[in-house]
Image (spheres, rainbow, N blue to C red):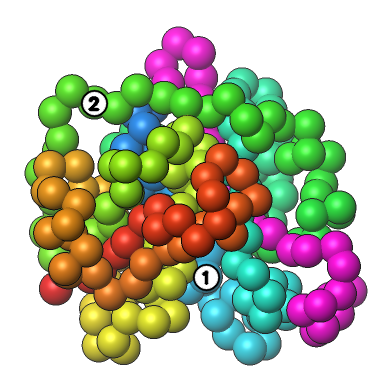
Amino acid sequence: MRPSTDPFDEPPWAMQLVARAEKASPPAHGAVCAAAATAVATLLTDPRAADPEGEWHPFVARWEAGRIRKVTRRARGARWSDVQRLPGVTVDVQGAQVRAFVPGAVDEVPPEIAKLQVAGLDLPDEDEPKPPPEPPYAAIALNPDVTMSTGKAAAQSGHAAHLLLRQAPPPQAHAWIEGGLRVYVIRDVPWRRCVEHATVAVRDAAFTEVPPGTMTAIGWIVT
């Protein structure tokens, strides 16, 4: 069934993100953020979503007509395996696995996802930042003056990747897509300097954790 095209229909829509967080070997905070951004970009450029005739396209179009809300949850063990059967894409970045799902109404989340915890995903980062990949890649910086859990930061990173796909200069966006949608989360460059490079800025809608209008993340494409 194709969704309503009216963005003012209730309830609101969201893209669900699920991060794998096994107790024995949890991923690093920054890796989860990079994986979330990569997963979002991978789903949005998948032919099933990007092609007007694709089976996911009407759901993505309906969601993008309103707020591009994203919700990050965590899963481990059998519950991580269970969600792999639902429509979406899974990526692995620096040992962090995140699956992005086709957007839908927040009151129609599949039970395999609805049972997963939203709050509480808060992971330590690696001691030393990794070097950036070879260009092209999306550079994403998270505001160091804003306290965010890993789940919140992952959603904001996904927003930044989403905005880059839609708002970056087309040659840059095309190069990023053709280059494999690599993402680098910056940790060792001052925030003010990052802002000078930014192509897009994420301002939070205040569904969770931070005041409305807070600039949580920025991004640009390095070619």
Q: What element carries label 1?
A: helix
Q: Is residue 65 above or below residue 75?
A: below
Q: Is residue 68 above or below residue 153?
A: below
Residue 44 numbered mark, or none:
1
Give the quarter of the image for residue 87: bottom right
Distance, label 1 to label 2, CA atoms, is 29 Å
Residue depicted at 58% across the width and 85% down the height: 51
Q: Is residue 60 above or below residue 155?
A: below
- Residue at the extreme top of the image, as rendered: 24
Say left or right for 105 vs 64. Answer: right
| Residue bearing mark 2 | 126
Residue 122 numbered mark, or none:
none
Magenta span main SS: loop
Residue depicted at 22% across the width and 63% down the height: 195
Residue depicted at 87% across the width and 67% down the height: 10
Residue depicted at 45% across the width and 37% down the height: 148
Q: What is the x, y in percent for residue 218?
A: 32, 61
Callout in the foreground (1, 2): 2
Q: Is residue 65 above or below residue 219?
A: below
Residue nearest the observer in this picture, 97 or 84: 97
Q: Magenta part of the protein: which range?
A: 1-26
Give the quarter of the image for residue 105: bottom right
The kind of residue on which mark 1 rests is Leu
